[in-house]
Amino acid sequence: MFRSHGDHGLGPVDMHTSIVKSSNVYYYALANDMGVDLMHDFMKPLTFGQLTGIDIFGEVRGVLPSQDWKRNYYRRPEQKKWYAGETISLGIGQGYNSFTMLQMATALGAVLNNGVKHRPHLVLATQDAGSKQPKLVGREPGVNLGYKPENIAVIRRAMVAVTQQGTSTRVFQGAGYLSGGKTGTAQAVGVAQGAKYNASKLEEHQRDHSLYIAFAPADEPKIAIAMIVENAGFGAAAAAPIARRVFDYALMNQYPSEEDMVAVREGKAANPIGTPRLASEAAWPPAPSAAAGAAQAAAATTGATAPVAPVASSGTIAAAFNPAHAAVTGTPTSGTTWVPRRRQAGATASPAAAPASALARPVQPRSP
């Protein structure tokens, strides 16, 4: 007997319905049928629990459990044994599973590329110190994982249905394109047997993380996203709305309205509100808000420090975030909204030390 918070009234469930309606019980049963080692062997080629090889320091491996892994990881004999109950929780990403957003995005990209996995890259080109001529960085060919096209089609159709009749329907209502996605929730702390999760009774750092993976356009995907918003709850509540704005920007040349950006930051927006601006016309860096100006004035009178507002510029958002013109600094980490920052003219890059948690700290999904 499996317990689940979201499977009431679903009736018979196949893989399509399990993805669209986010059925925990379907994956409990699937994990039980497969066993931990078979799951490990299927997921390892997708880079789960492996280094993706991205061209930046600080990537972490995470954990893709197996019986061998547990025998080697623990010291005491009683801890080395694999128990059947541990397999069940792996079906929805709980237990020893510990993956990064980069691994999830890489796996999604392989599915969208009909089973061909590519190594992720940040660097587009390098520049010769003498001639100043750019040189494109070569890309090694992808690895064909041998997946059957009909099986990939099942997953893609179901992920598209998630945005039309599933858990992210409200978020993508009215979008000018068709996308696919999957909501997720990653627990930060365990919940005791018989207890019920209640975010309002927990400290913020103990609350669930909001996850969303997505791709667009649905028929010919150009963008794959894996996103986490720490301690923000259900995937459709925080992560999916941000993914919607990313797609609107990349595919529709739309930049959110001021009221929409405020609502998204507060977790109060699903589909966009207000009138979006054209990204090709919106100024970048944005002018400081009235609140930011007041903070600067208060800091000046008290001698305290306040966040420095962006320097005014005649550039546009579209130009600032064009890969051909944007200079990227920093390291993407979990729980942060990471975007390229436009470097001031004449500035030089200084490599930042990558934190131990670089490229997304591994997370443990609480439900699919």
Image: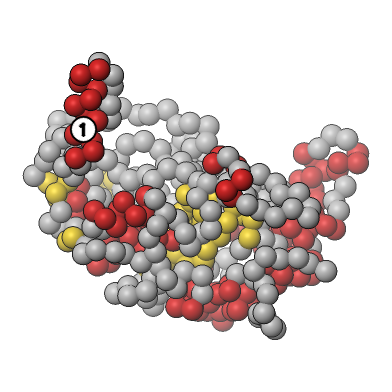
In the rendered image, the residue lying farthest to the right is: 77
| Picture residue at 36% right of the left edge, 36% below the top | 330
Viewer-closest of 132 and 41: 41
Question: x and y percent of residue 269 in the render?
Answer: 38, 60
Q: What residue type is disc 1 on? A: Ala
Question: x and y percent of residue 32 in the render?
Answer: 79, 66
| Picture residue at 12% right of the left edge, 46% below the top | 315
| Callout count | 1
Viewer-closest of 34 and 306: 306
Residue 235 can be seen in this image: yes
For label 1, the residue is 294
Is 305 located above or below residue 294 in the figure?
above
Q: Along the horizontal axis of the image, is 187 left or right of 247?
A: right
Residue 139 can be seen in this image: no
Q: Along the horizontal axis of the image, is 188 left or right of 77?
A: left
Name the image quarter holding the N terminus: bottom right
Name the image quarter holding the C terminus: bottom right
Residue 38 placement: quadrant: bottom right
Question: x and y percent of residue 147 in the render?
Answer: 58, 72
Q: Residues within 10 Å of mark 1 (few under 14, many from 20)?
A: few
| Picture residue at 19% right of the left edge, 54% below the top | 318
Question: x and y percent of residue 117 in the render?
Answer: 50, 61
